[in-house]
Image (cartoon, coloured by chain):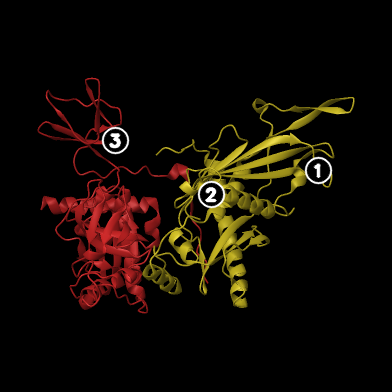
Chain colours: A red, B yellow
Amino acid sequence: MEVTDVNIRLACDRICLPAVSENEVQKLFTPGEDIPTCAGFMRGHGTYTEGEDLKASVAGVKEQVNKLISIKPLKSRYNGEIGDVVVGRVVEVQQKRWKIDTNARLESVLLLSSVNLPGGELRRRSSEDEKMMRKYLQEGDLISAEVMNVYQDGALSLHTRSLKYGKLSQGVLVKVFPSLIMRRKNHFHSLPNGAAVILGNNGFVWICPASGLEHQEDSGSAGGFIQDLEKEVPKADREVIARLKNCILALANSKMMLYDTSIIYAFEESMKFTITELLLPDVMVDVANLTQHRLHLDIAD
Amino acid sequence: MADILLSEAEKTFILHGVRDNVRNDGRSCSEFRPIELELGLVENANGSARVRLANTDVLVAVKCEIDNPSSNFPDEGKLDFFVDCSANATPQFEGKGGEQLAVELAALMSRAYQTRESFNLSTLSIIKGMKCWKLCIDVLILECGGSLIDAISMGTKAALADTKIPKVSVIGSDEGSLELELADEADGREEPLDWHHAPCLVTLNKLEDSLLVDASAEEEACCAAALIVGVSPNKKITTTSIPGHGSFLADSKVFTRALNLAVDVGVKLNTALEAAIKKHQTLKPPPRGFLD
């Protein structure tokens, strides 16, 4: 086996990643900092009062809607809303539901009544179904789902009642900050280079070969739970997936928003580097800058 | 180290990828992730180094003490390794959680440096049979992301390269007890150590029939067995260790192949590390530190 040379850099050559920002830099508030207020203000999330002053309790930017002042944090756990598409991992199998980890403050819940049973029948779930739960989804399985409901304590209730949701097959999971995923109409993208991407609102991005997503829709009768583990992903597809993963990490490192256009542009700009070069920090900044430039040209047109 | 949950499909994807020599991030099976090195971060210590390998972060510091040599080896100094798994690295290391791992790592490092060829302890002797230098090598694990022992061994070698021991002279002896005088730093008389033959440890993870160098946390979760080999720059093996519950003996060719691969990778790692250390020592850049 050929052994490649090892690359060791010095800390003095480290590049300080500047945030590739679109607008002018907004004022950032740090915890404990005073917020300039108007008379009769209302206190929103991320703030607290000390005496007569309004102070920030998290690090972030100020959002003001009429008299409601709140601070939106830069880095926080995922706060779910109804209708969001999420990618989650099963951590527990309980009596009539599964507990899913979605990078939120509490584990999300997937009720047995919210999934499509194999066979596709609509019927009342029996005790037999309860015992077979582990056959459908085990600990460690990845699923794509939609948020159906938000409980009082903030926990999310998910459902997979459409053909496009369900258990995810072969592919790679990438974790980024939830705030970097732009809210769009469609979160399932089939990219022109042969891979498919699911951008979960919770920051979990799933990359798989395009045939994987199609297969999911075809197996509608099976309720999206059958997986084909024998099928090997071809080498060309695998390289596309690896390159996509590195591009997404490069964009996330420079705190750029992730959506289908930015990912496609980043992929095209990265073609002049090899896949392993994309792991180097200076190359990551390069790719992010080139993508930002191209997006600006788009807006200018 | 940490337990990562993976679905069967993800494990199958990783396995097929390794067979095709294209890993999840595009690397081949024998490629390291980018490594960053900094020397001289800790001013109080005689020598220090920090190694960052993807998201593994390790800080190594070397401090010198004057000690009595052991009676078995009266003309040799001592090397003492101590590893501290801080709770910073993963929540599992909180309290006494990291103690077992720390003891294992320290023992492994001691074994790697035990031969005279990798580090000549007789250079640490001051007066035969009475006084010698004891190097206390302290390793602090700041973040744990796979390839921990590789980063620790690189950090140790770099810290030893950065170490300067003050010159010591004997002034008078008073009824059998000696008085030693340490040269002041202002006098500038400090000696560097001979670190060029120090070993680097390489971890090879075995996934079915393939061998992975520098496995990420997801890949480690798929592998049952690992082989850790200490390789010195002149292609000699100083120590081996087989953690994990899998077996290397199922196919005897795999073990020989693994040893040969480890030696090749180890030699390349040593060369790259020496080059980086030399570059740092010639450039003498200001410390970059932990922020930014």
Which tag is nearer the camera, tag 3 or tag 2? 3
Pointer 1: what residue?
B70
Near mark 3 (Cα within 10 A), the count class, few <14, some 14-19 or many ≥20, is some
Name the side, left or right, on which B132 lies relative to A212: right
Q: For residue B276, which numbered disc appears in the image?
A: 2
- Residue drawn where x is 62% and y is 68% of the image: B259
Give, as a three-letter code, the residue at label 3: Ala
Q: Which of marks 2 and 1 is nearer the N terminus?
A: 1
Name the side, left or right, on which A174 lies relative to A61: right
- SS category of the residue bearing label 2: helix
- SS category of the residue bearing label 3: loop
Q: Give the x, y percent position of residue A195.
A: 27, 69
Give, as a three-letter code, the residue at label 1: Ser
- Asked if one can make out residue B90 in the rendered structure from this viewpoint, the answer is no
Name the side, left or right, on which A162 lies relative to A175: left
**Are the residues under marks 3 and 2 on the same chain?**
no
Q: Give the x, y percent position of residue A88.
A: 30, 59
Q: Quadrant of the C terminus of chain B?
A: top left
